[in-house]
Image (cartoon, grey):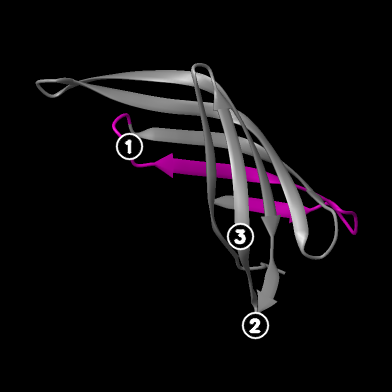
Amino acid sequence: MEYARQWKSSDWAFGLAYEHMADDHQHRTYGLILQYRFNDRIHMNVEPGVTRETHELGANLSETHWVPAAHTEFTYEWELGRIDVGPFLELAVEPGAQHLGFGLHIAIPMD
């Protein structure tokens, strides 16, 4: 989930990001967004932040770690009525882990 606000009438936007990956260690990333719009359809996000990982140790015990994270996302979107949709590609890097993801970007403009 992301919220980005365009800086006046420029190609730049700033905001907040949250990502949850439902895996064995309940991976949650919180970050800041710096977004650049190349044109009306293509934009790139750079998202520095922190990831919270919770590892189950058994017998109702768990261990939580906070690690630095960096995400980069490229999105191609088009308008479908009042909603922007399109594919995205994301690269995420954390100490000891990297992932490449893709999916469907859905945005509801709040202007």
Count of residue discs: 3
User: Which element is circle 3 on?
Assistant: strand
Q: Nearer the viewer, residue 46 or 33?
A: 46
Say whether disc 3 or disc 2 marks the residue closer to the N-terminus.
2
Main SS category, magenta section: strand
Q: Position of residue 11 (x, y in %)?
A: 87, 53
Please tell me whether residue 69 is drawn above or below residue 40 in the rendered image.
above
Q: State how far apart marks 3 and 2 are (Cα).
A: 17 Å
Identify the residue position indicated by label 3 in the image: 87
Q: Residues within 10 Å of mark 2 (few under 14, many from 20)?
A: few
Mark on residue 82?
none
The reply to whether discs 1 and 3 touch (Cβ–Cβ < 8 Å) is no
Q: What range is drawn magenta here?
A: 3-25
Identify the residue position indicated by label 2 in the image: 81
Q: Residues within 10 Å of mark 3 (few under 14, many from 20)?
A: some
User: Type of residue at label 3?
Assistant: Pro
Say whether disc 1 or disc 2 marks the residue closer to the N-terminus.
1
User: Which element is circle 2 on?
Assistant: loop
Identify the residue position indicated by label 1 in the image: 23
Looking at the image, residue 45 sits to the left or right of residue 51; the answer is: right
Q: Position of residue 24 (x, y in %)?
A: 28, 32
Q: State how far apart marks 1 and 3 are (Cα).
A: 23 Å
Looking at the image, residue 21 sits to the left or right of residue 8; the answer is: left
Is residue 41 rendered magenta in the image? no
